[in-house]
Amino acid sequence: MDTVLLNNKEKDLEIAAEFIKKGEIVGIPTETVYGLGADASNEAAVRKVFEAKGRPADNPLIVHLADFSQAVDYTSAIPALAYKLAKRFCPGPLTMVLPKNDRIPMITSGGLDTVGIRVPSHPVMHRIIELAGRPIAAPSANTSGYPSPTSADHVMRDMNGKIAAVVDGGSSEFGVESTVISIEGESTARILRPGCVTREMLLEVCDEVIIDHAILHELEAGQKAASPGMKYKHYSPKADIIMVEGSLEGFISYVGEHNGDSVYSLIFDNDRDNFPYRYMTYGKDSSQQAHLLFQRLRELDDIGAKVVYVRAPETEGVGLAVYNRLIRAAGFEVIRI
Ligand code: TXA
Ligand code: MG
């Protein structure tokens, strides 16, 4: 199949929406990362998404709507807290796991009786949902296991020949995927995947916000994941990623002891002066790190890095999302110095 590259003008968005209506798959920009969009209610279309990504069938897809008011059409119950959260954070990078109804096929929900609902703020994704007039199931548009795509070029590299089209909407604003939460009781949210709607922001609306254990810890054999995505190795470039926690001085001496051909460091902008080894930087604060992380992981592969030592980000605010992606990319290998 020839994968068509579309632009973000109305005429091209109509073409993208037509593909979705016909059961084809389109790479679509969102404010978080690029998604691989399909009609969420069309089983054959959703099957193609799993095939294109090489994704395990038990890992559910998020369903994207143009407005949270449409969630009643695809769920069997919506707690009052979900409406409060929607009022504050939708449209935006928040996904709420809610009990699904029959209009969401089991293949879309990975066999679960819940569905992740998200209302994206990106005007291109929003317009395509409106034009298609369907809920759009969209996982991140990467090959399963590889870092999520934050540009149309990344999507093309992973999906060329496997999907109908990619819409180029420029580089993704946030750069990490949405915050995924479930709701417990009257006023508690559980974060299943951290993102740019942070714990601190959720606490403006919820009395309690629980950070699921699996966000920072490897699941033990036989342990059940609250979110299936937490079971799988993720976000991993070909290079071996090793996270190093501690001072810059400690980091430099550690890399010095382990330096060699094709060894790189991924450091903060402020570490750059006099850094003695091969490096790339990934920003100066958590928001920049989120925006740049996946792009840098792909670039490190492009330049042939085999081992990458990464300065560990902080775990507050958006930093928790960055740390969570890195610890998975590193297969939970963290050096503390
Ligand atoms: O920002 C995003 O969320 C992007 C853009 C395209 O919207 N999408 C995305 O989808 O990251 P994906 O499929 O790559 O990641 C969805 C995550 C997975 O870890 C999945 O296990 C979890 O959300 N998830 C989806 N539905 C769920 C459900 N019903 N219960 C628990 N976890 C769910
Ligand atoms: Mg993904």
Image (tube, rainbow, N blue to C red):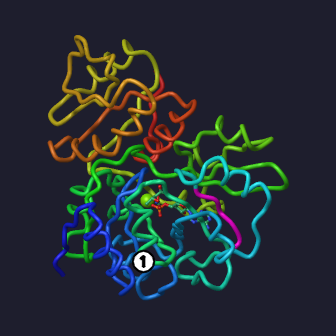
Percent across and percent down for residue 249 are: 36, 12
Residue drawn at (39%, 69%) of the image: 128
- 23 relative to 199 in the view: left or right: left
Query: From this viewpoint, which residue is outermost toward the right?
Result: 186
Give the residues drawn in magenta, as a range. 95-99
Task: Please name the residue that numbered disc 1 is placed on.
Answer: 132
Residue drawn at (25%, 56%) of the image: 154
**Near-viewer residue (48 or 17):** 17
Q: Residues within 10 Å of mark 1 (few under 14, many from 20)?
A: many
Query: From this viewpoint, which residue is outermost toward the front?
Result: 10
- 255 relative to 226 in the view: left or right: left
Amino acid on which the number 1 mark rests in the picture: Ala
Percent across and percent down for residue 212 are: 66, 48
Percent across and percent down for residue 254 are: 34, 21
| Relative to 36, residue 223 above or below | above
Residue drawn at (72%, 37%) of the image: 204
**Near-viewer residue (195 or 83):** 83
| Relative to 107, residue 308 above or below | above
Helix, strand or loop at disc 1?
Answer: helix
**Near-viewer residue (178 or 263):** 178
Residue drawn at (65%, 34%) of the image: 200
| Relative to 273, residue 25 above or below | below
